[in-house]
């Protein structure tokens, strides 16, 4: 059951991800289990407030709400001006979407889930949540966040791969190999990625490293 | 909105539907066809007006509110929360919650879905949508919407009750009485209470079958 409480978006954790995107975890803060909900801001004008992605893997419909400022959305190549109060609904998970901040303080609320199915916590949340620990090379903390998420999503190849990277950096080589091999079994594309990923340099010559 | 891969809408373009509890409903989920969770805006015009009805959601959805414009004073259990724009209020099922506007034109975004089970759109959204159609003079559209609702949710009295109202307004006495009887079968107490002074039934109230339907 989710937690009763309140918070301003300004008071939430602010985790820089990439391309200027700052993630403010809402679902995790209140332990909401019924749907996906997060907020995004940009470090500066021109930074992303929705990272470029599609939802083909999770098959989520997503609804973005511009709460403050102004953003430019690009949906499958079409550009949309989105001032505060705009709802951008992406019905088709295959649509590639990205949004850029046009004003200081632009804040976008992102809501998502797969119609007809009970919501499941997405593995990427743990990967985002582990970013500060990984940047500070606090590997045990980053690994613990991944392990916690793995209990909910044991078949998530991206999560297993990321966990293997953290373990390799944290000198837990055997665990890293086990998780990397499992990730490659589930999704062979991670084999090619592993071959050139600097996070895995410490285990690349170990027996059992996936070819 | 058609089945396009995406759709864009501004808050100012949302319909405003009057509700019996006070605030205006601004339907978002239904308008867009979003299937993953409940999403609606609620607007109060004046300071002191209710913007979120005081209620619990026993065994219902987890709900999250976000203040979009104006300012609200939320109650959450025993707590009072000053909520300017950007405030999030999380209300699990069972916790009493509500909000009053502290500034004019306060709008709150309400999100909800149950944990551990698929989201199913709630019947009250259809009832309010039908009410909006009736107010715009589209009584046939309203009746059609509620007929679809009672077919989809045959165990919920609210759909039958409102269908009875609209059939009555349309002069379809037999259909109105059939719907009213079914509403009584499902939950007699509120149906009798509402029907007692509901003007929508004025045209059939003198029909002896009206009293029989409520008996």
Image (cartoon, coloured by chain):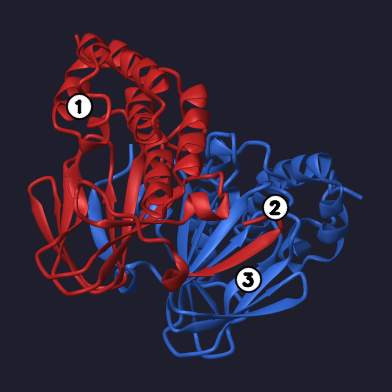
Task: Return the x and y of residue A69 as percentages of the image width and height.
Answer: 44, 84
Examine the rendered structure and indicate whether residue B120 appears above or below residue B155.
below
Q: Tag 3, which secondary structure? A: strand
**Mark closer to the observer (1, 3):** 1
Relative to the observer, which residue lies in front, A97 or A205? A97
* CB under 8 Å between discs 3 and 2: no
Examine the rendered structure and indicate whether residue A152 appears above or below residue A78.
above
Q: Tag 1, which secondary structure? A: helix
- Say which chain tag 1 marks: B
Residue located beneath label 1 in the image: B195
Label 3 environment density (alpha carbons within 10 Å; few <14, some 14–19, many ≥20): some
Structural distance between the alpha carbons of marks 2 and 1: 39 Å
Q: Confirm whether residue B120 shows in the render.
A: no
**Image point 16% across, 74% down: which residue?**
B103
What numbered label is drawn on residue B3?
2
Q: Tag 2, which secondary structure? A: loop
Examine the rendered structure and indicate whether residue A171 appears above or below residue A177.
below
What numbered label is drawn on residue A145?
none
What numbered label is drawn on residue A51?
3
Relative to the observer, which residue lies in front, B89 or A12? B89
**Image point 42% across, 46% down: which residue?**
B129
Q: Quick one: quadrant of the C terminus of chain B?
A: top left
**Mark closer to the observer (3, 2):** 2
* CB under 8 Å between discs 1 and 3: no
Structural distance between the alpha carbons of marks 3 and 2: 24 Å
**Mark closer to the observer (2, 1):** 1
Judging from the image, what is the letter of the chain drawn in red? Answer: B
Structural distance between the alpha carbons of marks 1 and 3: 53 Å
Task: Return the x and y of residue B185 as percentages of the image width and height.
Answer: 30, 10
Marks 1 and 3 belong to one chain: no
N-terminal label among 2 and 1: 2
């Amino acid at each position: 059951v989710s937690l009763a409480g309140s918070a301003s978006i300004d008071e939430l954790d602010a985790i820089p991800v990439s391309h200027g995107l700052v993630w403010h975890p809402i679902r995790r803060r209140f332990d909401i289990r019924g749907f996906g909900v997060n907020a995004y801001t940009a470090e500066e004008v021109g930074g992303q407030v929705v990272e470029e992605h599609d939802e083909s893997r999770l098959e989520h419909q997503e609804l973005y709400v511009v709460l403050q400022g102004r953003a430019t959305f690009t949906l499958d190549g079409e550009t949309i001006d989105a001032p505060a109060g705009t709802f951008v609904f992406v019905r088709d998970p295959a649509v590639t979407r990205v949004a850029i901040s046009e004003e200081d303080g632009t804040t976008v609320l992102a809501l998502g889930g797969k119609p007809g199915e009970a919501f499941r916590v997405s593995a990427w949340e743990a990967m985002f949540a582990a970013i500060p620990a990984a940047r500070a090379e606090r590997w045990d903390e980053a690994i613990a966040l991944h392990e916690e998420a793995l209990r909910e999503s044991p078949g998530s190849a991206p999560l297993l791969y990321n966990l293997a990277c953290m373990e390799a950096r944290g000198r837990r080589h055997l665990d890293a190999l086990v998780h990397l091999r499992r990730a490659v079994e589930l999704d062979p594309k991670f084999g090619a990625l592993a071959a050139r990923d600097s996070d895995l340099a410490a285990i690349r010559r170990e027996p059992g490293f996936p070819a | 909105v058609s089945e396009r891969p995406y759709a864009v809408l501004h808050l100012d373009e949302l319909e405003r539907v009057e509700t019996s509890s006070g605030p205006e409903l601004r339907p978002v989920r239904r308008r867009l066809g979003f299937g993953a969770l409940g999403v609606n805006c609620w607007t109060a015009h004046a300071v002191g007006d209710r913007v979120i009805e005081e209620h619990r959601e026993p065994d219902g959805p987890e709900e999250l509110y976000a203040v979009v414009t104006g300012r609200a004073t939320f109650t959450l259990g025993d707590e009072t929360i000053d909520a300017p724009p950007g405030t999030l209020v999380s209300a699990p099922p069972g916790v009493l919650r509500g909000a009053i506007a502290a500034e004019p034109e306060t709008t709150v975004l309400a999100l909800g879905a149950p944990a551990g089970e698929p989201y199913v759109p709630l019947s009250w959204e259809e009832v309010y949508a039908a009410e909006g159609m009736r107010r715009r003079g589209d009584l046939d559209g309203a009746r059609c919407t509620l007929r679809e609702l009672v077919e989809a949710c045959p165990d919920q009295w609210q759909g039958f009750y409102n269908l009875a109202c609209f059939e009555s307004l349309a002069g379809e006495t037999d259909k109105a009485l059939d719907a009213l009887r079914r509403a009584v079968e499902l939950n007699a107490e509120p149906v009798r209470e509402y029907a007692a002074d509901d003007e929508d039934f004025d045209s059939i109230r003198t029909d002896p079958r009206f009293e029989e339907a409520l008996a």
